[in-house]
Amino acid sequence: MTNEEYDKLIKKHIVENNIIVNTTIAFVSGGLIGVLAEVLTNGFIKLFNCNISDAYLLTFSFFVVIGSILTGLGFFDKVLSICKCGLIVPSTGFANTMTSSAMDTRGEGFVKGIGGSIFKLTGSIILYGVIFGIIFGFIRSII
């Protein structure tokens, strides 16, 4: 097989992505998730009569639980293919990464498998989140 024949074969199987369409879908789906988060936050404030910081925590926890459930049931990747990267807001992306890491090693048991690898991919997210939180907190306290 020559290089030209190989290139024709590859081009036949590669799907061209439309950047404008994908960006629009990600923008709209991310915006809808943001609207859902605001509705949930306001609902938690009214339903549980809590302050706004507790409502934000409940909203974040809600998205982590939903992202983990969708990943565990195998629906997250299907929804992600529709919503594009608009679904990978920090909470759902964090939950997907954490749950998929745990699912990959669940056969090794709870301690060495799930417990030992649940934060394998999300550890860097936590580490740099804490580091930059400290840095920006320090900068804000100076200014």
Image (cartoon, rainbow, N blue to C red):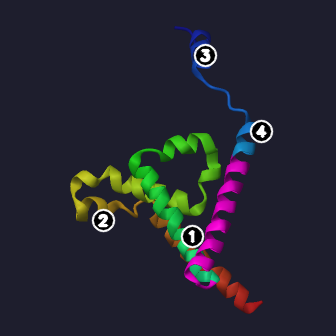
Secondary structure at badge 1 equals helix
Q: Nearer the viewer, mark 1 or mark 3?
A: 1
First in residue order: circle 1 vs circle 2: 1
Q: Is residue 23 left or right of residue 5?
A: right
**Disc 3 and disc 2 in contact, CB within 8 angstroms:** no
The answer for how far apart the CA atoms under marks 1 and 2 are is 25 Å
Q: Position of residue 75 (x, y in %)?
A: 47, 45
Query: What residue is rendered at 66% in x and 85% in y?
Result: 137
Residue type at the position of mark 4: Ile
Local packing at callout 4 (Cα closer than 10 Å; few below 14, some 14-19, many 20+) is few
Q: Position of residue 31 (x, y in %)?
A: 71, 56
Asked which quadrant contains residue 143, the reply is: bottom right
Tell me, yes or no, whether the highlighted magenta stretch contains residue 50.
yes
| Residue with the mark numbered 4 | 20
Residue type at the position of mark 1: Thr
First in residue order: circle 3 vs circle 4: 3
| Residue with the mark numbered 2 | 115
Q: Nearer the viewer, mark 1 or mark 4?
A: 1
Residue type at the position of mark 3: Lys
Q: Which mark is residue 12?
A: 3
Q: Nearer the viewer, residue 37 or 92?
A: 37
Q: Which mark is residue 59?
A: 1
Q: Is residue 83 left or right of residue 96?
A: right
The answer for how far apart the CA atoms under marks 1 and 3 are is 44 Å
